[in-house]
Amino acid sequence: MEEKLGLEELKKKLEDCQKKSEEYLAGWQRSRADFLNYKKEEMERISELFKYGAEELILKILPILDNLEIAEKKLPEDLKNNENVKGFLQIKSQFQDFLKLQGVEEIKSAGEKFNANWHEVVEEAEAKDKEAGIIIEEVQKGYKINGRLLRPAKVKVTK
């Protein structure tokens, strides 16, 4: 009888051990899944931080590109074939290529209808041949980065 009681006791202890091991395994699996989710979320957050950090740098570079574009517009015809001037224009082209690689794109403005999401009005002008709210001049280019507004275009619109 003692052997039978010992066997029953051992079976009960074995069942308890199996339940505990299943419980511990399930807990470990949940913890591992939570950790993997946390790791994934952290990587996404770090990636977003780098994107926003790049935006700050790009916002500081844009005035340089603006000045190169102004210089190109005001360039006299007789200097357009000058080798030194071509070098400066190549630098402007390199800036534009760099910005494209970073996901930056220009906001189209001239001739478009004013859109408060992308444009900032700096002046209104009379125009009899155009409907109100049409952009007649771009004062400063605007840019988007990865589809989000980086800097609005400053524009003149019709009244």
Image (cartoon, helix red, strand yellow):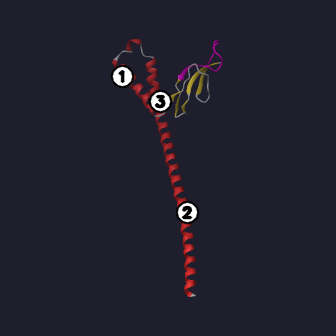
Mark 1 surroundings within 10 Å by alpha-carbon count, few (fewer than 14), some (14 through 19), many (20 or more): few
Helix, strand or loop for disc 2:
helix
**Whether residue 73 is situated above or below residue 5 in the rendered picture:** above
Residue assigned mark 3 = 62
**Position in image of residue 110 (x %, y %):** 56, 20
Disc nearest the viewer among 2 and 3: 2
**Whether residue 52 is situated above or below residue 64 in the rendered picture:** below
Q: Nearer the viewer, residue 9 or 55?
A: 9
Q: Reading the chain from its start, which is encountered first: label 3 or label 1? A: 3
**Position in image of residue 73 (x %, y %):** 46, 18
Report the Cα–Cα distance between label 1 and label 2. 66 Å
**Position in image of residue 141 (x %, y %):** 52, 25
Report the Cα–Cα distance between label 3 and label 1. 19 Å
Q: Quadrant of the N terminus?
A: bottom right
Residue in the image at 54% along x and 85% along y: 3
Q: Are marks 2 and 3 in contact (CB under 8 Å)?
A: no
Question: Which region is colored magenta?
Answer: 124-139
Q: Which mark is residue 26?
A: 2
State the image quarter where residue 19 is shown. bottom right
Q: Quadrant of the C terminus?
A: top right
Mark 2 surroundings within 10 Å by alpha-carbon count, few (fewer than 14), some (14 through 19), many (20 or more): few
Q: Reading the chain from its start, which is encountered first: label 2 or label 3? A: 2
**Whether residue 156 is situated above or below residue 12 in the rendered picture:** above
Q: Are marks 1 and 2 in contact (CB under 8 Å)?
A: no
Kind of residue sitting beneath label 1: Gly
Helix, strand or loop for disc 1:
helix
Q: Can residue 115 be found in the magenta stretch?
A: no
Mark 3 surroundings within 10 Å by alpha-carbon count, few (fewer than 14), some (14 through 19), many (20 or more): some
Q: Which mark is residue 87?
A: 1
Kind of residue sitting beneath label 3: Leu
Q: Which mark is residue 107?
A: none
Residue in the image at 56% along x and 87% along y: 2
